Amino acid sequence: MRILAVDDDSLLLELMEITLQGAGYVDVDLASSADEALAQIANSVTPYECILLDIQMPGTDGIELCAHIRSLHQYKTTPILMITAMTERSFVERAFAAGANDYVSKPFDPFELVTRLRLAGETVRQNRVVAEKVFALKNLRNAVEEKSRFLPTSPVLIEDVTGVVDQVVLENYVLQLSRGEAFQTAAFAFKIREFDTIYAQSSPSEIYLTLTDVAEAIANQLKQTSFLMAYTGSGVFTCITRRNAACLTDELCQFIQYDIDEMALCYDDGRPCTVTLAMGEPQTKSRLFGGSPTDIITNAIAAVNTAPGPRRMGGLAAVVAGGVQAGAS
Amino acid sequence: MTQAQAVQGADSALSALRTRFVERLTVTIERLDMMAESLAEGIEPSTNLVGIIDELHRLSGIAGSFGYAELGVEAAELEMAFREVRRTEEAHALLDKLDVHVARIDEITNGR
């Protein structure tokens, strides 16, 4: 373990060096002032693994030096032990506040000093283990992020939101409807405005979570009726419900937008992520329809791409939205 | 180097350090005497007060490590007392105690 001992008393420094070497700590550097200590830290190729600091020194004292060292990136978790005389006990609290881990009483008992250093050594070892685990986790997270990356146009299955299914399942559902059921069915879609911008600013997990939040907000407003929804890519959610469903009102998109605004979505770095939703006109089939049964899905997606965004609600409208939600649940 | 050699080396280094400590006590006595005298005469009281505190602090921090635990404790007590001094008269009242302490240090330097 590389140790730096700092004390303005050269005799005490030498005594400490002899004691430490006697206990097997042979890699010990000495400094007789804060300036000398900082210079040695700056010039050290590999960081010190433990630092011993006298509290009372001329110029910058040990507590100020401790705070300074702690502010250095490489010394965030390095054990710092204060060497305190009996008369300095009142300073110990300040030393801990400045980032010290422990203290050794002066005149020091060699056994106490070595014991505390062993504890510090254990801290160093644990810090290394934690650092290695954090590094491994970061790598793993990056690998997962890369693996979960999807194109902005790709349909993605949103999991754990009631009523949300895979795009293929949604199409299969429509395909198996009888002629009568198909007539009773309406398809409509929601689109996240400026989805490409949000996509570009998000990590794969961030964009996935944003899509999940939006899906939840939509599902929350549709939950009183029977529906299926799929994320069909490019920020579009396509829904299937009955054409006479009570939820299909002019205000539906506003209510969902209100829920999304309430979520106060943000990116991992804390920046707000503004999600504005547009809703397309519901699409239905006439009794004498031809073409593919899945045309209503295609038409719903086409309709949302030309739809205007919702008016954001505030004041009374927001209260109404809350009331509708409360009534629906 | 064998363990026995290492222990012998450490003992000899400690012995040399102890000799230097005792030698340094002579300087400590001179400084304490000089500053106590100046303080008694009212010359730069705050500078001399701080100087006395520093000398006592240094002594209290190391004396115990060389087998002079009592001397270290006494130095620490005196240091505390001088730290609490707010007026020059209070410092004067402590100078007799300091004198006794210096005499004790002197005994060590004279090998008594």
Image: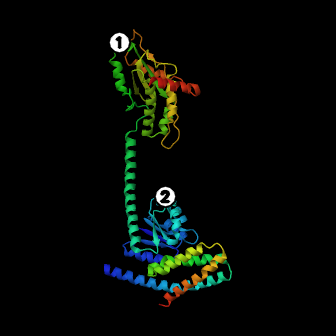
Residue at 44% across, 63% down:
A79
- Helix, strand or loop under label 2: helix
Percent position of residue B92, x then y: 64, 80
Q: Quadrant of the N terminus of chain A?
A: bottom left
Do the residues marked 2 and 1 share a common chain?
A: yes
Closer to the camera, A210 or A163? Answer: A163
> Residue A21 sits in which quadrant?
bottom left
The answer to whether A196 is drawn above or below residue A2 in the figure is: above
Return the chain for callout 1.
A
The answer to whether A220 is drawn above or below residue B101 in the figure is: above
Q: Which residue is mark 1?
A: A179
Residue at 53% across, 62% down:
A94
- Count of numbered circles in the view: 2
Return the chain for callout 2.
A
Residue at the far top in the pictured view: A288
Task: Name the side, left or right, on which B40 lies relative to A31.
Answer: right
Closer to the camera, B23 or A282? Answer: B23
Dot 2, how many residues are within 10 Å of its Cα: few (below 14), some (14-19), or many (20+)?
few
> Residue A60 sits in which quadrant?
bottom right
The answer to whether A210 is drawn above or below residue A9 in the figure is: above
Q: Amino acid at mark 1?
A: Arg
Q: Amino acid at mark 2?
A: His
The answer to whether A71 is drawn above or below residue A304 in the figure is: below
Look at the image and name its color scheme.
Answer: rainbow
Percent position of residue B41, x then y: 68, 83
Residue A73, labelled with which disc? Answer: 2
Percent position of residue B53, x then y: 58, 76
Residue A219 seen from this side: yes
> Residue A117 sits in which quadrant?
bottom left
- Helix, strand or loop under label 1: helix
